Amino acid sequence: MSVTSDRIALHGHFASELADLSVPWQAEGTPDPQLLVLNDRLAADLGLDPDWLRTPDGIGLLTGTALPDGATPVAQAYAGHQFGGYSPRLGDGRALLLGEVVDADGRLRDLHLKGSGRTPFARGGDGLAAVGPMLREYVVSEAMHALGIPTTRSLAVVATGRRVRRDELLPGAVLTRVASSHLRVGSFQYAAATGDRALLTRLADHAIARHHPQAAGAARPHLALFDAVVAAQASLVAAWMSVGFVHGVMNTDNMTISGETIDYGPCAFLDAFDPATVYSSIDHDGRYSYGNQPVVAEWNLARLAEALLPLIDDDQDRAVELAVESLGAFRPQYSAAWSAAMRTKLGLPAGLDDAVATTLVDELLVLAERSQVDHTSLYRALAASARGDADAARGLFLDLRDVDDWSARWLATGPDPDAMDRVNPVHVPRNHLVEEALDAAVAGDLGPFERLVDVVTSPYETRPGLERYAAPAPDDFGRYRTFCGT
Ligand code: AMP
Ligand code: MG
C-alpha cells in the first residue's frame, strides 16, 4: 500500500502488514506552525525537496497535518520493561508513523512524528512535546550520526504555536524523525503477549526483511534474527561506551531491532570519566548508569529472546537452550567491539599483544576516573602527547607519577596520533553547550543552536575560534540533571 503525490511516495508497509500492531490515527492540528530547523542533507537523501519542505504544504507533511491523499498514519503498539517493571501496553502515546519512504540507497526509512497529539496509547499524557527537548533530540541524534554511530535521524523540528504544560507553560513542537524502522524489543514483547503466533511470525519476518535479511536463509531464521540483534546491539553499545554516551532510559521499548540508537530523552555525554555517572533525575538506583549499559543491553536482549521463544523451536525447553546459547554471544561480541574501539582510541599498533593492550586500557580508565578527567578531551590530548607535547595529557591528571608511568609504557608501543584523531571526536554535544543553545532557542534565538549543530556534525574537526566548544563545562555548571517525559 502506498500513496504518491508529486512530492513524495509514502508507503504503508508497517500499517498494512502489521495492522494488528497499530491504530490508524491523525496528527493534531498546529495553530501557528514555524519551521525551526530542517536537515537539508537528510531531506535530499530521502528524495524530498528541502525548498518544498519549507513551504506551508511541506510543513504540513513535517507535522502530519497535510498528508498525501490516502496516507495511513498509525500509532504503533508496543509493550516494554520500564526500569525493570513490565508494562503490557505502552505504544506511541504522542507519536505517529506517517509511513515509509525509499531513500537514495534504496532502503526503506520510516517517517515518524513525535509530539503530534494524543493517541489511544497516551494514557495520562498530553500527547505533546516541547521545543527544547525536540531540538535536543535533533542535535544529539545528528551528532551521533556524524560520529558514525547507528541512530534514528532528525529531519525537522516545527514549533506548533501551541503551549505545552510542564512545570511551566512551554512552546510546543513536533519532531520529524527518520529511522530504518521503529521496531523495538517492546514490539516483540507486545506481539508475544497476544499469544497469536501468526502475528509474532509476521513481525519477525518483517524485521528480517527490513533489517537482517541474511537471517532468512538460516536453518532457524528466527533464531538467526535474534543472533543478528544481539550482534547489532553489542556493537552499538560498545560505540556508545567509547564516546561516553549515556542513553539514560534503556527500557525495552527504547531498544531497536535495527541496532539504531532511539529515543533521546534523558541522554547525555560524559564530562568527567566515571562509570557510575547517571544524569536522569528518576534513575535513583543507577540502573542506566554509563557503566551499566552493556549489562542492561544484555538484560533487554534476554527479554527479546523470551518473546521469540515460540518461534525458535516447538519444544520450548530446546528453544530456551538455543536462545541462551545465542545470548551467550553478547559478552564476547561486546568485549571484542569495546577492545577494538579502545585500541583505536589509543592508537595502538595492530600487532600489539592483547594482554598488553588490555592492561593499558584498564589502567588508563582507572587513572581517568581517579582524576575525573574529561572523557572527550583525554584522547585528543593523548594524541598531542604522542606527537611530542609531553604536557598535553599530563595536565589533565591529578596523580602525575602514575600517569607518567602509564604514558611511558603507552608511548613505547608507538601509538599513531593520526589514527587516534580520526576516531576521537573534538566535539560532542556537551551538556552545558546543549543547555545554552536550547535556552537561547526557546527564547527565540536559534543562532547558538545552529552553531552547535554545525560544530557537532563535524566532530573530528578542530575549529580555530571555536575552542569553547571543545572545552569541558565550567566549574559553576554543577551536576547535570536530565528528565524523561519531556
Ligand atoms: P519514552 O520514555 O519517551 O520512550 O516514553 C515512554 C512511553 O510514554 C511511550 O509509550 C510514550 O509514547 C509515552 N509518552 C511519553 N510522553 C508522553 C506524552 N507527553 N503524552 C503521551 N504519551 C507520552
Ligand atoms: Mg520511547
Image: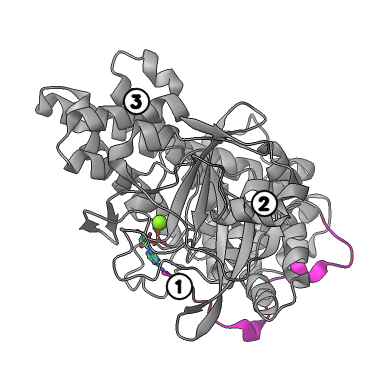
Label 1 packing within 10 angstroms: few (<14), some (14-19), many (20+): some
Mark 3 Cβ inside 8 Å of ligand 2:
no
Q: Main secondary structure of the magenta part?
A: loop
Which one is closest to the eye, mark 1 or mark 3? 3
Image coordinates for residue 274, horizontal then vertical, percent = 50, 66
Would residue 359 be seen by someone viewing this image from the given angle?
Answer: no
Q: Nearer the viewer, residue 169 or 284?
A: 169
Mark 1 Cβ inside 8 Å of ligand 1:
no
> Which residue position holds label 3?
205
Tell me which corner region of the image, top left, top right, bottom left or bottom right, holds residue 22.
top left
**Residue 58 disc label:** 2
Image coordinates for residue 163, horizontal then vertical, percent = 53, 78
Q: Which residues are drawn in magenta?
A: 462-486
Q: Residue pushed farthest right?
A: 464
Q: Nearer the viewer, residue 371 or 269?
A: 269
Magenta segment includes 368 = no
> Which residue position holds label 1?
483
Residue at the spot 35% in from the left edge and 70% down from the top edge: 125
Residue at the spot 40% in from the left edge and 41% down from the top edge: 183
Image coordinates for residue 236, horizontal then vertical, percent = 50, 43
Could you tell whether 368 is left or right of 87 in the image?
Answer: right
Q: CA distance from mark 2 to mark 1?
A: 31 Å
Query: Split into 4 quadrants, where in the image is the N terminus?
Result: top left
Give the amino acid at mark 1: Phe
